[in-house]
Image (cartoon, rainbow, N blue to C red):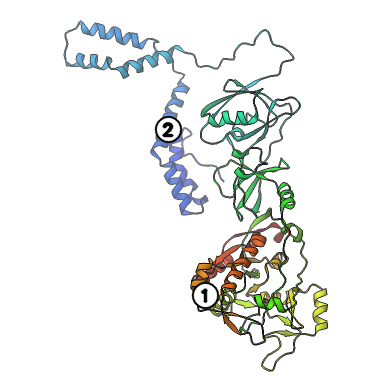
Amino acid sequence: MPALSTGPGSDTGLYELLAALPAQLQPHVDSQEDLTFLWDMFGEKSLHSLVKIYEKLHYYERQNPVPILHSAAALADDLAEELQNKPLNSEIRELLKLLSKPNVKALLSVHDTVAQKKYDPVLPPMPDDIDDEEDSVKIIRLVKNREPLGATIKKDEQTGAIIVARIMRGGAADRSGLIHVGDELREVNGIPVEDKKPEEIIQILAQSQGAITFKIIPSIKEETPSKEGKMFIKALFDYDPNEDKAIPCKEAGLSFKKGDILQIMSQDDAMWWQAKHEGDANPRAGLIPSKHFQERRLALRRPEIIVQPLKISNRKSSGFRRSFRLSRKDKKTNKTMYECKKSDQYDTADVPTYEEVTPYRRQMNEKYRLVVLVGPVGVGLNELKRKLLISDTQHYGVTVPHTTRARRSQESDGVEYIFISKHLFETDVQNNKFIEYGEYKNNYYGTSIDSVRSVLAKNKVCLLDVQPHTVKHLRTLEFKPYVIFIKPPSIERLRETRKNAKIISSRDDQGTAKPFTEEDFQEMIKSAQLMESQYGHLFDKIIVNDDLTMAFKELKTTFDKLETETHWVPVSWLHS
């Protein structure tokens, strides 16, 4: 930013500088909202008053003023006594009344106190009995309001000393620059801490307000200054420090929800990182478990993942790929299997902790991001996809699946299906050319990677619905998938809204439609819960299909934002 001009004169005051500041900053401010904030802030009357007071004090400081006398209160008493002996007119009465007022007397008393003191800094004399072996002690005074101090402490197991374990970035201790990691704490507000537990000291600090005085023995080790972190991560789990027994200080913890973007401020500690919520104006960081520590904890207590088999159905819908799904009854009578393309992120995705992310916005010349739709059977996923396709056939497209079954008379190769031989299908499976595939009535069905590429190459948004365990294999630089989970409403709402609807069964090749049963509702809810608990960290958006029209409207709005706004994506997608 260029230097701010202070006007033609070299003696322009701070008041005039602040008044001119918003106008000079205007070319550098992006939004009208920020500009309005600047005008309101610099136009605040209390700020103007403070600046005027500062300028007056600064002026008198330069003049080096000296008190004319040190006893104004005594002089006022002498004057009042002398005036009592004079003939009393209105002016004398008013002056006597003024001099007798308590606030005037207090003002004169304060004047005398200030006039009699010296305010030049004077160092105390060095004591004569200094022990050369004694540790140097530093007395620190910090002003603490409602915010935490921003430091954690621990007891040295060998010496028993209370040591500063970490300084939270942006906290009161960090901003002061006076307390450092490794410093030994001796006293807090005059209370010795040698025989106290860290928890007791934290309690003393928590109850203290205003100025807090510390007696500290500085650490010999010099700290290397850390720059503010530029690393951002997406949280893949919910975290509440109050429920974490391992955290060294619950008050210093930072809570977050799955999907939150966090800025990492420090990774000095292998077990506990310091972070703050992205965009949070508060500079103070909080403790979160490190990626390695959280992965280790989750791996120890995580139950075995139940992998759902690929489901296939022969659903008749002109214009889309048929979903590889089976109804509950079909599962009992059909042998199924699945296979997915290999992914470098397979292992880390199974233990959801954090994912390093970066802002991304699609450029005009780029292909559209792949949109992956996930949801349980019967939730209305295909109905939503159909409405999207109908809304703009030039903008949205779907993949054409491969199959090994014989082509029927009314079908065209490459329209309903791409018909290939069983041998070629199995060869493509071995070469990892399918995103997912399965077997139904001795015929293979599958969605190939090339079919997705074909839609994207036509400059269309590719709508793809797959099983949730397949999603992690699509998360690549090439596709940059945006994953939307279509979730059912409550079972009471399902009974109300789906009582006249039908679910398509694939018990035969005609794909007959049958009314929903209570068992179907139960299965849908259970399946959705399983998907969200196991794969929810891979979902970018959750839409509850309570009402088809409203769900479609929300879906369409999401698509519009996806194409025009900035989103957080894995760093690997942009730096592979």
- The numbered dot on residue 498 is 1
Quadrant of res 314: bottom right
Q: Is residue 272 above or below residue 108?
A: below
* Rendering coords of residue 158 (x, y %): 76, 26
Q: Residues within 10 Å of mark 1 (few under 14, many from 20)?
A: some
Q: Residue furthest bottom?
A: 409
Q: Which residue type does callout 1 highlight? A: Arg
Q: Earlier in the sequence, mark 2 or mark 1?
A: 2
Q: Quadrant of the C terminus?
A: bottom right
Q: Does residue 12 appear in this view?
A: no
Q: Residue at x 63, y 66 (%)?
A: 482
* Rendering coords of residue 211 (x, y %): 53, 26
Q: Which residue is mark 2?
A: 50
Q: Is residue 357 above or below residue 548?
A: above
* Rendering coords of residue 517 (x, y %): 57, 76
Residue closest to the eye, 229 or 523: 523
